[in-house]
Amino acid sequence: EEVAAEALSAYHARSKSRVDDLFVGLFKSVVRCPDPECGRTSVTFDPFLSAKLSLSSSAEQRQMAVNLVVVRDSDSSGYQQVTVKVHKEASIKELIKAVAEEVGAGLKASNCILVEILSNKVYKYLEDQESVETIQSQDKLLLSEMPDARPFCKSGEQRWGLPSAHNSPDEEIGTDDQPSSSSSFGVVLYQRRAVSSSYSSFSYTRDVGVPLLMTIPKDATVRMLYKKVERDLQRLFDAEDAEWKIFKVSDSKYHCSSDEQLLDPESDELLHPQGKESRLHFAIEWQGQEDELPEKLSQEPFSRSSNNADGEVELVRLLQMFVQEERLSSEDAWYCSRCKEHKEAFKKLEFHHCPPVLVLQLKRFQYTRWSRERLNNPVAFPLKNLDLRPYLTASAAKRSTVKPVYDLVAVSKHIGSLGGGHYVAFSRSSIDGAWYYFDDSTVRRCSEEEVSSDKVGAYVLFYIRQDHRPEKFGGPS
């Protein structure tokens, strides 16, 4: 108690105002060395103006949920949506392995290629050694199974810009993972629909669906390609009666019509790519009106990610996680003065002094080395009787003469995303006790139900201790 009083007194000696009297509280922070032979423990009391609550536990924060679509090589079930959780420091190779284990049914990670889809095209091939942190929540990921995935793997020359006789530092010359070691080559098939203009004789194409990735033998002909595509379209889209053609296109993401070549389904001309490329690009052009296309083709296979894999969470649950002991990560390692080195120590925070006005900030903005995003997890928060006694230190709970029970008085709401958004607020008036909504110059009266229902937008919550309630609020319920 003396140490806590000294910490609070030292703070007020530097900063003393009405704001400090109302908003400043005190945390008790206990950090202990993980080495049992050391036993070093550090106890400090730290002033705070707000408590920043994570929307997930420390263990969950070290993981990320990845949503993707899986297309099997021989399964007729079509697209399969899968969500897996992996460590944020995992590689793409580990992600693919996790997906294979989740799907099961004989799916092998070594037979899969993971790509990012943008505007109905393959935007990026995700390589095994990349970090999953490069994946953002809005990315559309497609995992394709094929008998031989090697033609889609990057060679050392493609990855490092080295002559073909050299490979990357972690590859050996002539390994089985090289595209050249495969007896097949990769095929990327974009899908589009022929559209005729109602105002002129001009016609154009519109991209539809998602690309199909497959491999075929190096001695394959145009006729064989048509047969392979026909089987896959029938398997994935039930396209038995639909009409379509295949065009050879450039390998650019946005190919031009001048680069295209219509392929004859009866041709026995070889398709084998020339030069260094291990894959070719084609376009399946569906004929007929939009309502004549296979129904599955127009369905969106990618689920909209809301960054809310675990559903709604109660505010009291966030407070429970806030005061739970956690293991610090290597990035936040603590220097142990007894061991003389940085340690991934155990840390525990508790409330020791609760201020008259409690500010709780929900950590909705998440940052990694590769991305930034806004978390849309719904948080249910009470308008009355938020009790902090379960989260107090033992000594504070014994000496407390005023119950640390709070009622909500204001909410700062964020609308939008990390790239751009807008702030509005709900606030309860001390003059008439009613709730009001504030949006720039617009102010209107609102209900308690409207305030409590905004579980995704809520960003900063302001609670007032019940012994400081304005008279117009009435007595505590």
Image: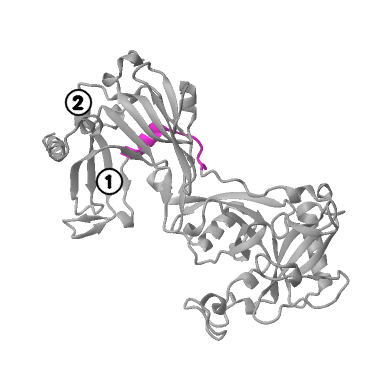
Residue 344 shown left or right of residue 159 in the figure: left
Labels 1 and 2 touching (C-beta < 8 A):
no
Is 336 inside the magenta-drawn segment? no
Which residue is denoted by mark 1 in the rendering? 347
Residue 4 shown left or right of residue 244 in the figure: left
Is 309 inside the magenta-drawn segment? yes
Residue 164 shown left or right of residue 400 in the figure: right
Percent position of residue 101, x then y: 57, 55
* Closest to the observer, 364 or 441: 441
User: Residue 321 sits in which quadrant?
Assistant: top left
* Closest to the observer, 17 or 55: 17
The colour scheme of the drawn protein is: one colour
Percent position of residue 460, x then y: 38, 35
In the rendered image, the quadrant that contains the C terminus is top left
In the rendered image, the quadrant that contains the N terminus is top left
Q: Secondary structure at mark 2?
A: helix
Percent position of residue 296, x then y: 75, 49
Q: Looking at the rendered structure, which numbered label has been put on residue 398?
A: 2
- CA gap between label 1 and label 2 equals 23 Å
Residue drawn at point x = 62 percent, y = 58 percent: 117
**Residue 328 drawn above or below residue 223:** above
Whether residue 246 is visible to the viewer of this picture, yes or no, is yes
Whether residue 113 is visible to the viewer of this picture, yes or no, is no
User: Residue 153 sits in which quadrant?
Assistant: bottom right
Which of pointers 1 and 2 lies earlier in the amino acid sequence? 1
Query: Label 1 is placed on what type of residue?
Result: Lys
Residue count near mark 2 (Cα–Cα under 10 Å), binned few <14, some 14–19, many ≥20: few
Which span is picked out in magenta?
Answer: 308-323
**Residue 39 drawn above or below residue 204:** above
